[in-house]
Amino acid sequence: MENNANIQEYLNRAREIVEERSKKADRPLTFCVNTFGCQMNARDSEKLRGMLLEAGYEPSDSEASDFVLYNTCTVRENANNKVYGRLGYLHGLKRRNPNMKIALCGCMMQEDTVVEKIKSSYSFVDLIFGTFNIYKFPELLVSVLESDSMIIDIWKEHKDIVEDIPTKRKYPFKSGVNIMYGCNNFCTYCIVPYVRGRERSREPKDIIRECEALVKDGAIEIMLLGQNVNSYGNTFQHKVSFASLLNDVASISGLRRLRFMTSHPKDLSTELMDVMADHSNICPHMHLPLQSGSDRMLAAMNRHYNKKRYLMLVDQLRQRIPDISITTDIIVGFPSETEEDFLETMDVVEKVRYDSAFTFLYSKRTGTPAASMEEQVAENIAKERFNRLLERVQKIGSEQSLRFVGTKQSVLIEDTNKQDKNLVTGRMMNNSVVHFPASSDLIGKEAEVKILESKGFYYIGEMV
Ligand code: SAH
Ligand code: SF4
Ligand code: F3S
């Protein structure tokens, strides 16, 4: 609670400064938060937006703002490159606006080499902080507003889990809820455990309280978030399983839709599948990252399951939840991957027939065990495999999508269609996207929609 008192005090101080500068400039000061990476970052950005609003800034979509914050991702090399690319552009904007402050946070900032590079080549950046001290943002904001030199505050680990940070949800009708932070799995290719720290679960009562408040506030859909939700509660003395947490959240009266991300196959229990089957408000969707179909690769990746066990899990899911959509992540070109290993991945793709799959070219992350493995796969070979895989997952995904054509589905309307203003865009329970004619007044509401046609990645429908 002491932390929250501090948060408020600093926000009040920031508000005074922002008001004063806005008077001087004779216009409101604006902020823009740009988010890279996964749902965890998206959720953190909602907290950062909430704090910036309370500090008196007005929201803007344009980076020509007075406070620009990039919440960065470093899971693959190209995520980093995007940020460096955009910083040059921000520098140009800053030259024209004396009020402008540029701040960087998120996973990339937890890497020493990145911070060094920004200090030496991007010295116009005003603030750098990391993933463990987001709740300190109001204090850092005040310091930045009162100073002209670069402020850097990076911690190496979590200290406390701070509850009740002011938050501005991107969508009023849906929200992510963190159930745990960090990751203990150390898949050998992955940088997340190094930049997000050790796994820590939030207390069930705090999670339930947050979810109940969201439902009361009109949220229709909640997504429980963690790098490996299936190991939720492992760090508590009194063990609580993810299945029992999911059961409790699903039982909150008035909650229409409940999702979760991400499930690691090594910890997926039949108890969890039973809870999914028992509650009609739990979305029939399982994102179950495969990474590779080869037992040799899976062992080298430190994934703790093999092809046979993975396929068994898929069977068990389909037995309990017949129409479930199964999606996945796959990495191509992990060190020493052979054609034979790759064909094992293709075999799983053929057997599971995913509704959709995110496919990634292996990206070497400094400091991870895989980065120093010998036999890195040549880029042209990895790319050729990647293209073969992509073609198959897209073909299978579009074939799979046909099973819903002609059915009636409940769709949560999320937005107007970007290309055609007469259409709205929403999601079915299984997370598939549907476009159909309706008024934008219906955004945030559920509609019964007949699915008329599949376009491969999305559907066309009509309200019934
Ligand atoms: N915690 C989640 C994944 C988080 S990262 C899980 O375990 O499923 C999201 C995806 O990025 C991973 O599933 C993996 O497929 C991909 N990924 C992670 N590190 C990568 C790397 N070094 N190169 C390529 N893809 C990577
Ligand atoms: Fe990375 Fe593996 Fe943790 Fe997922 S489970 S975040 S892939 S280390
Ligand atoms: Fe990226 Fe960090 Fe998420 S590295 S994928 S934003 S946890």
Image (cartoon, rainbow, N blue to C red):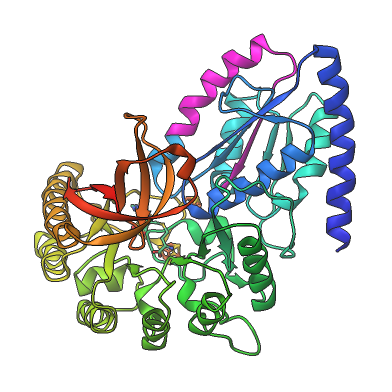
Image coords of residue 409 (percent x, y): 30, 60
298 over 355 or under it: above or below: below
| Residue located farthest toward the front when viewing the structure as drawn | 464
Examine the rendering and report whether any part of residue 334 can be seen.
no
Q: Quadrant of residue 267?
A: bottom left
Residue 92 shown left or right of residue 52 in the figure: left
Image coords of residue 118 (percent x, y): 59, 31
Q: Main secondary structure of the magenta part?
A: helix
Examine the rendering and report whether any part of residue 408 can be seen.
yes
For the point 78% across and 37% down, which residue is it?
A: 141
Image coords of residue 373 (percent x, y): 32, 59
Image coords of residue 186 (percent x, y): 45, 67
For the point 55% across and 39% down, which residue is it?
A: 114
Who is closer to the viewer here, 380 or 222?
222
290 over 70 or under it: above or below: below
Who is closer to the viewer here, 186 or 409?
409
Who is closer to the viewer here, 147 or 243?
243
Instruction: Reply yes or no: does residue 105 show up in magenta.
Output: yes
86 over 455 or under it: above or below: above
99 over 294 or under it: above or below: above
Q: Quadrant of residue 79?
A: top left
Count of numbered circles on the image: 0
Instruction: Reply yes or no: does residue 284 show up in magenta.
Output: no
Quadrant location, the N terminus: bottom right
Quadrant location, the C terminus: bottom left
User: Magenta segment, which residues?
Assistant: 82-106
Who is closer to the viewer here, 51 or 251?
251
